[in-house]
Image (cartoon, coloured by chain):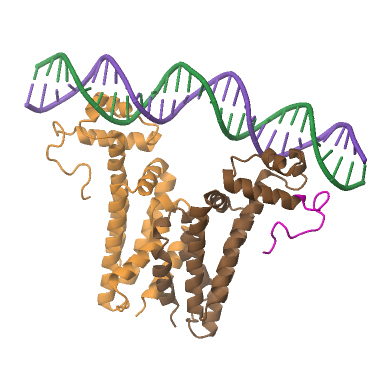
Chain colours: A orange, B brown, C green, D purple
Amino acid sequence: MSENASSAPQSRGPADHNVREQIVEAAEEHFSHYGYEKTTVSDLAKSIGFSKAYIYKFFDSKQAIGEAICAKTLSAIIVAVEEAVANAPTATEKFRRMFKSLVSTGVSLFFNDRKLYDIAAHSAGEGWPSARAYAQRIEQILMEVIREGRESGEFERKTPLDETVNAIFLVIQPYVNPLLLQYNLDLAEEAPVQLSNLVLRSLAP
Amino acid sequence: MSENASSAPQSRGPADHNVREQIVEAAEEHFSHYGYEKTTVSDLAKSIGFSKAYIYKFFDSKQAIGEAICAKTLSAIIVAVEEAVANAPTATEKFRRMFKSLVSTGVSLFFNDRKLYDIAAHSAGEGWPSARAYAQRIEQILMEVIREGRESGEFERKTPLDETVNAIFLVIQPYVNPLLLQYNLDLAEEAPVQLSNLVLRSLAP
DNA sequence: CGAGTGACCAAATTTGTAAATAGTCACATG
DNA sequence: CATGTGACTATTTACAAATTTGGTCACTCG
């Protein structure tokens, strides 16, 4: 939603009409169908009726295309989380729903769009900008929730905010980071509940 | 230290003299040098002067040998943890040291004995008995520490013990499970401190 | 009978090589 | 000049043949 593909409309390569978007669309379809490795740049070019060389006028590399669709995938998760948080009455409940929706969206990505999940996991493993932005946004939302809870008196205020947020971020990391989630799938059901309880206990005034 | 290799001395295969031990010793050396996959059971046999077939009188499979040295590796970590816990005055401090020693021993295994670490990680990923026993023992020690803290009045007593232990186990899991630790190495320094603080806050009466 | 093995097999792994792919560039074309 | 491309190369990948390896068993030897 921020520095995504379709944003930055200013001339970046040659014409800006909509070729870049076409590439992204084709990539999204091919990647989610055949996976990142199995789709070639020529496939993408062919499917939008251009030559492979032209693609490189819009993206520096195949990986850059992967980045674009990875960013799209991850920001869909963020949107789900934002909605979940927005609909919650208290900070306590915001945290619970945030954690839960984060995990369940991730898990459903894993089972329903494995190919896209794999890209996201790879992205997280390599520290691509899309993954960094994702993690950063989550931390940001988390901080807003904690701050709200502190202001409303739900949470304690002694511990430095940064420290609290950082620690909680560490707790949820294994279920939120696509690279790690896949190794914790068997805990995806219980972890959000159990860990929310623990975290909220640690936040008690 | 419990149901390890060299225990169970009763006749298991043919003679019990010390062939089994020789195998384990040779395996430990070869595995840590060349890795599990790169050492063949013929290598092991040759290095102790027997034929490959004879090895199978003592172990059902190559994996069983891997299990044995994996169990040895993991129980070395447990020993370090037990010492750390034993030397701590309070339950609070026991928990801090337990977590810290668990991580630092694991990290040092990763950097100093990568080949052995890889076996442990594989073991954890496949749910081998050695890894299960390791996790179980950690949970057990954790429970003892929490119980002690509850009895001494350091920790709260309202939450069911099982639930508390389970949640804390989930928190430390990513830094304690060899399969996961390797993806969290960059956090190995801060995580034990930050998370200990959070957990102990959640345990406050 | 207990200690120990060579020979054997199916499955996995390595190896060598032909084919495919990411990425570049000089050049069309209107 | 803006839009677009075929042809080229260095590097990967895909694949089949050849080798190795995990595992078994009938057998020897004392």
Please give left or right for residue B115 compared with residue B15 in the image.
Answer: left
Of residues C4 and A57, the one nearer the viewer is C4
Of residues B113 and B92, the one nearer the viewer is B113
Q: Position of residue A132 (x, y in %)?
A: 30, 52
Please give left or right for residue A187 compared with residue A4 in the image.
Answer: right
Q: In which quarter of the image is residue A201?
A: bottom left
Q: How many labels sit on residues?
A: 0
Q: Where is residue B36 in the image (x, y as percent from the top left)?
A: 60, 44
Q: In which quarter of the image is residue B86?
A: bottom right
Q: Is residue B84 above or below residue A72?
A: below
Q: What stretch is highlighted in magenta?
A: B1-19
Q: In this view, does A130 lie above or below B130?
A: above
Q: Main secondary structure of the magenta part?
A: loop
Q: Which residue is drawn at 68% across and 43% down?
A: B44
Q: In this view, does B139 lie above or below B61?
A: below
Of residues A199 and D19, the one nearer the viewer is D19
Please give left or right for residue B41 compared with residue A54 in the image.
Answer: right
Q: Residue B173 colored magenta?
A: no
Q: Where is residue B187 in the image (x, y as percent from the top left)?
A: 39, 60
Q: Where is residue A197 in the image (x, y as percent from the top left)?
A: 43, 71
Q: Residue at x 50, y 61 (%)?
A: B176
Q: Which residue is drawn at 15% across and 37% down?
A: A12
Q: Residue B18 colored magenta?
A: yes
